[in-house]
Image: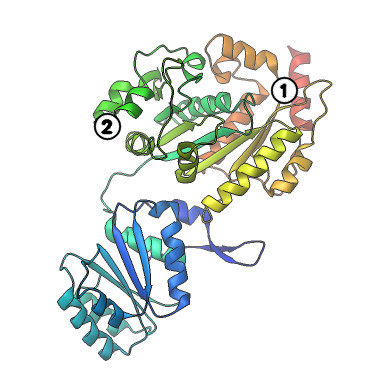
Amino acid sequence: MTNLAYTTDPNDAVVPDAASMQALRPVPRISIQAFCETDGVAQPIERAGEDRRMAKAHVKVHMGGIQTAIEFYHTAPTPNLIIIESRDEPRSLIGKLEKLAEVCDPASKVVVIGHHNDVALYRELIRFGISEYIVAPISMADIVADIAKIFVDPEAEPIGRSIAFIGAKGGVGSSTIAHNIAWTLSTLFQSEVVVADMDLAFGTANINFDQDPAQGIAEAVFSPERIDEVYLDRLLAQCAERLSLLAAPSTLDRVYDFDADAFASLIETAQRSAPTVILDVPHVWTGWTRQTLAQADEIVVTATPELANLRNTKNLIDMLRKLRPNDAPPKLILNQAGVPKRPEISADDFAEPLGVVPLAVIPFEPLLFGNAANNGRMLGETDAQHAIVKIVHDMAHVLTGRTEMKSKKKAGIGDLLGRLKMKKKSA
């Protein structure tokens, strides 16, 4: 059984460690039925069914143990996986499992959750053909991990991580930061990166990367039946040696209304093509943006330090915590801090009601960002020694797990503004 780490949340509830959960592979499209004798087992299974890694699986929990399952499958087809909780003694358990086997499809997998920590019983069940024996109590993470262990091929190629960027308001610089993070990952770590510009009407990735591809993300979304790695490769525009772009058409020739899962297969295919997929999500709230954020491996919210951004950021973070209860909260970037003569909320005051520590606070620097944007270049190409480029490097290290956030350090921009002033004086 997978050994996952656990932490304690502010309400003293035991929750799975986010890093351990991140390592779990998504479960394929399977049907799962559980027959439970206690709420202590039924509730973690129900929670597992709500986890984003189980989004494709269909999970149904019944109260009643192995005898209920036997009666149920006399008239119903068996699913891909049956989970049975049993408090029976080993000898009685084996006898009932033999009766269950008489009414089950031989291809169905069975996991038994028992209350006897008995090595001999475990060996006997494995010889009998049971896929896994778990000793109660169990956690939600145990269930997800064991299902993944059964149905995910351990020899399968690893899939890339998806990092979704979204702005708390329009114009806060979320896309610019997403594109610069993508470029930094590809150059600093010599790693393949795919950028997906999901703002089909007004996307700016093609401008920021100085590209004008004839095809892009629209062709993939409007022809989902054609999506595979070969077709995706034809749609990608090469921006740098290890950086590819799924560009948005950025035209208003048609309306872009999509179903909630419209981008799902595209993102999955992109994750099989590169270790990192950067999702540039527009500032809209639709079924597909909600679904994209709910399923992403990491989320970054960009905001500027003023009241409307604070309200929107809190709404986003609160909603995403509900949608992703087993994942770390979104990362927060405060951008355009220190605009002259503009009243602002301090970084500490902005972060406090959100319950997060900013990943970065980026000072207002219109000359650097303006020159980069107008020339179709990234910040690191425009001025590699600039202090903000160093901030982007730091963010890239944290988002790829190479370093951890310094959560105890108070957020602030004084030292960054000081470095910028020193740089200007020396220039």
Quadrant of image for the C terminus: top right
Q: Of label 1 and label 2, which has the lower sequence position?
A: 2
Residue 378 location in percent, x, y?
54, 18
Residue 264 location in percent, x, y?
37, 39
Look at the numbered disc 1 and give the secondary structure of its residue.
loop
Q: Is residue 220 left or right of residue 415?
A: left
Residue 409 visible in image: no
- Amino acid at the residue labelled 2: Glu
Quadrant of image for the N terminus: bottom left
How far apart marks 1 and 2 lie (CA) works out to 40 Å
**Circle 2: is it few (<14), some (14-19), or many (20+) Cα within 10 Å?**
some
- Amino acid at the residue labelled 1: Phe
Residue 81 location in percent, x, y?
27, 65
243 above or below 100? Answer: above
Q: Is residue 386 left or right of residue 59?
A: right
**Corner quadrant of residue 389:** top right
Look at the numbered disc 2 and give the secondary structure of its residue.
helix
Instruction: Pick the residue in front: 154 or 229.
Output: 229
Residue 119 location in percent, x, y?
32, 82
Instruction: Pick the residue in front: 398 or 48.
Output: 48
Q: Which mark is residue 229?
A: 2
127 above or below 105? Answer: below
Tell me the residue at 34%/55% (across/down): 57
Tell me the residue at 25%/64% (across/down): 79
Kindly check if marks 1 and 2 are in contact, taking CB atoms under 8 A apart as contact. Answer: no
Residue under circle 1? 364
